[in-house]
Amino acid sequence: MKTILVFLLQTIKLFGLFLLFSLIFYFAINWFNEEYQGMRKYDEPTGEAVKVYSPSVGKNTKSNFVDRLLLYYLDGE
């Protein structure tokens, strides 16, 4: 009888620790989500940012697409 009670007590302690750490993890993830939710990541950069890509205005779209596709295949990315 004593071994069953010890086993039951250890199981309850293990479940309690699991529940405690799960709640800590849950609230940490929510805290990070709230922290980064307010960031406006699609705003135009300020400061000394450099524009990396500017589409060609004079070229037709089919040729531009083929050129970009070939560049993609050549770079392997």
Image: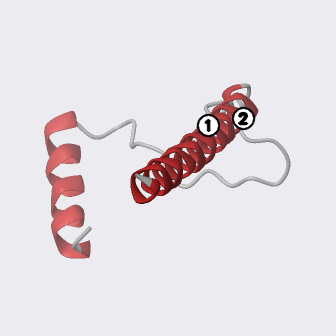
User: Distance between the Cα atoms at labels 1 and 2?
Assistant: 12 Å
Q: What residue type is labelled 2?
A: Trp
Query: Disc 2 on helix, strand or loop?
Result: helix
Tell me the tag on residue 35: none
Q: Are marks 1 and 2 in contact (CB under 8 Å)?
A: no
Question: Residue 13 at what x, y percent from top left?
Answer: 57, 49
Q: In this view, does 39 lie above or below 50?
A: above
In the rendered structure, the answer to whether residue 18 lies left or right of residue 39 reads left
Residue at the front extreme, as displayed: 1
Identify the image quadrant of the C terminus: bottom left
At horizontal 39% and vertical 36% (from top left) the residue drawn is 57
Of all residues, the one furthest to the right in this rendering is 47
Residue 39 x, y percent position in the rendering: 72, 31
Q: Quadrant of residue 28?
A: top right
Q: Which of 3 and 34 is in front in this view?
A: 3
Of 14 and 8, nearer the camera is 8
Locate residue 59: give its quadrant: top left
Task: Judge the density around disc 2: few (<14), some (14-19), many (≥20) Cα neighbours within 10 Å.
Answer: few
**Residue at 17 percent of width and 55 percent of height:** 69
Q: Mark 2 sits on what residue?
A: 31
Residue 23: image tag? 1
Give the colour scheme of this rendering: secondary structure
Q: Position of residue 71 (x, y in %)?
A: 24, 65
Question: Residue 12 versus residue 65: which sits nearer the camera?
Answer: 12
Is residue 73 or residue 23 the one in the foreground? 23
Dot 1, crowdedness within 10 Å: few (<14), some or many (≥20)?
few
